[in-house]
Amino acid sequence: MKVILFGATGMVGQGVLRECLLDAGVESVLAVGRSPTGRQHAKLREIVHDDFIDYSAIEPQLAGYDACFFCLGVSSVGLNEVRYRHLTYDITLAAAKTLARLNPGMVFIYVTGRGTDSTEKGNLMWARVKGKTENDLLKLPFKAAYMFRPAGIQPLHGVRSKTAWVRAICVGAAPLLTLLNRVAPKFMTTSERVGRAMINVARDGFPRPVLESEDINAV
């Protein structure tokens, strides 16, 4: 399986990249991002690309892939709806539409979050935007598309958030997060499990297009 990974320098993407590089069934990984990952591996190739709305300059390099793991995302804190929609909906759909055209046999997996509003009509701005993003991704002509909705994610194996306060919480609350992963699978998962689940779902499919934390852990 040949994989394109967006967001490989973020906390979720770091974990997904690690699992892809470890998995013997993943032949190669193309990481697309604004900055290098800093990783060196025989299976890894990287494209540093600044314009996440226009991929015309690199389209030839995006063809011939079996799966896309889209792990880009931002917090809605401090953002108005127009800005958040651009960073969440516009950027995701621009990449997805390009990839659907170039790779119609591709499986596309998108990381959203628990509480996403599929009706697009709720009171929470971020949940409405995420819901529209999910809904429009599912309309694209991929072989299949899956929406991953983890709640809490515990970073493992050296994975670190780029946000200082998130790093501090993860370090300080590590014992509690470990406990919650054992006793509350509906609300917690790990960076390792998210990566493993993406690979397994891309390879084997899943009965439903939306996976919550407990589904991710089970897969």
Image (tube, rainbow, N blue to C red):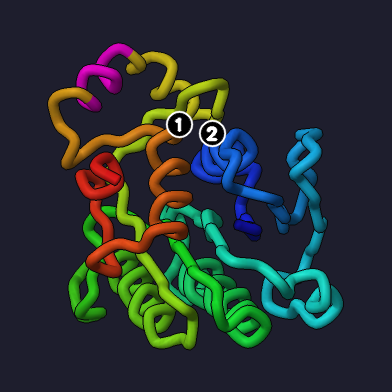
> Residue 213: in sight, yes or no?
yes
Tell me the kind of residue under disc 2. Answer: Ser
Q: Is residue 12 left or right of residue 64?
A: left
The residue positioned 72% from the left and 55% from the top of the image is 30
Q: Position of residue 202 (x, y in %)?
A: 45, 59
The magenta region covers 175-181
Name the residue located 65 percent from the left edge and 58 percent from the top edge.
2
Tell me the tag on residue 122: none
87, above or below 34, in the image: below
| Residue 178 part of the magenta segment | yes
- Disc 1 marks a residue whose amino acid type is Val
Residue 10 in the image, given as x and y percentages of width and height:
58, 43
What residue is shown with label 2? 161
The residue indicated by pointer 1 is 166
Q: Would residue 180 be found to the left or right of residue 39 on screen?
A: left
Q: Per the image, is 39 magenta? A: no
Residue at far left of view? 183
Closer to the chain start, of discs 1 and 2, is: 2
Check the image and name the residue furthest to the right: 57
Near-viewer residue (137 or 3): 3
Q: Residue 6 location in percent, x, y? A: 62, 57
Q: Secondary structure at mark 2?
A: loop
Contact check, label 1 and label 2, Cβ < 8 Å:
yes
Label 2 crowding class (10 Å Cα cut-off): few <14, some 14-19, many 20+?
some
Q: Callout 1: helix, strand or loop?
A: helix
Q: In 3D space, how far apart are the residues under numbered discs 1 and 2 (Cα atoms)?
A: 6 Å
Of circles 1 and 2, the one toward us is: 2
Please, is residue 27 above or below residue 49 in the view? above
Q: Main secondary structure of the magenta part?
A: helix
- Residue 162 visible in the shown view: no
Q: Quadrant location of residue 177?
A: top left
